[in-house]
Amino acid sequence: MWHNLCNLTNEVSRRRALPFPGTAHREALVVIANARHGSESHRDRSQWDDQRHDHLATARAAVEFFRVQELSIPRKAPLQRRQLADLRVLADAVDRLAEGAPSPSRPLGELLRRTRFAYESSGDIAAIGRGWNGFVATLVPAFFDLRLRRRELRRCRNPGCQWLFLDTSPGRGRTWCDMSTCGSRMKMRRYRRRLRQALRA
């Protein structure tokens, strides 16, 4: 049974959940959004600068980033310009979601119209497509799943990092992508700032 994903919005609103195995795909979608991040997301301090790093700028950079992040991606098919553009649309959509944008953007709507899926006998949704087209198509329903969980979507409060993550802690109180890195780093900076202010007083 074939459908266009534009028809999914009402179903998501009604059911409050997607008939789609979404956890791994939802996390993969966040990884793709994190392909654009602050330089302090890198553990290697030699990569730190004042620029926002964009690993979706080229297909080669994107594939390298996905491999470093251990994302399951097509191994043989090359990532083409159109598919890279679609990944950027998905990354933009997640960014908008993190910023509290009320509705998906027009480019995402166009991607939805091009994406096809089928209901399987198990009741799950399976995206239609192979290679990178299938990879992109699989992530589109995951966006709706993520949209239902948008209150869990957080951006690291370290301005130099801004890594996105899903806060599944009981109180939804996580501030940093990682307490041992950004959390510790920002606490040390606040301490040093207070110390300098005390010395000038």
Image: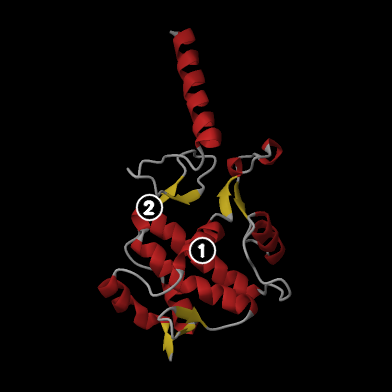
| Quadrant placement of the C terminus | top left
Q: Position of residue 46 (x, y in %)?
A: 71, 37
Q: Nearest the camera: 157 or 67?
A: 67
How many C-alpha atoms fall within 10 Å of the one at disc 2: few (<14), some, or many (≥20)?
Answer: some
Residue at 36% of width from left, 58% of height from top? 150
Check the image and report above or below for 11 versus 172: below
| Quadrant placement of the N terminus | bottom left
How many C-alpha atoms fall within 10 Å of the one at disc 1: few (<14), some, or many (≥20)?
Answer: few
Q: Amino acid at mark 1?
A: Ala
Q: Amino acid at mark 2?
A: Glu
Q: Residue furthest front?
A: 122
Residue at 52% of width from left, 29% of height from top? 184
- Mark 2 lies on a secondary structure that is helix
Q: Nearest the camera: 13 or 85?
A: 13
* C-beta proximity under 8 Å, tags 1 and 2: no
Q: Nearest the camera: 68 or 100?
A: 68
Check the image and report above or below for 50 versus 124: above
Residue at 49% of width from left, 43% of height from top? 177
> Which numbered disc, 1 or 2, marks the residue that appears first in the sequence?
1
Quarter of the image for residue 11 reads bottom left
Residue at 48% of width from left, 50% of height from top? 164
Q: Which mark is residue 113?
A: none
Q: Position of residue 137 (x, y in %)?
A: 52, 77
Check the image and report above or below for 45 versus 147: above
Q: Residue furthest left?
A: 14
Quarter of the image for residue 149 reads bottom left
Check the image and report above or below for 163 versus 73: above
Q: Quickly name the residue at label 2.
A: 152
Q: Position of residue 8 (x, y in %)?
A: 36, 79
Real-space CA distance between mark 1 and mark 2, rounded to the nearest whole angstrom: 16 Å
Q: Quickly name the residue at label 1.
A: 24
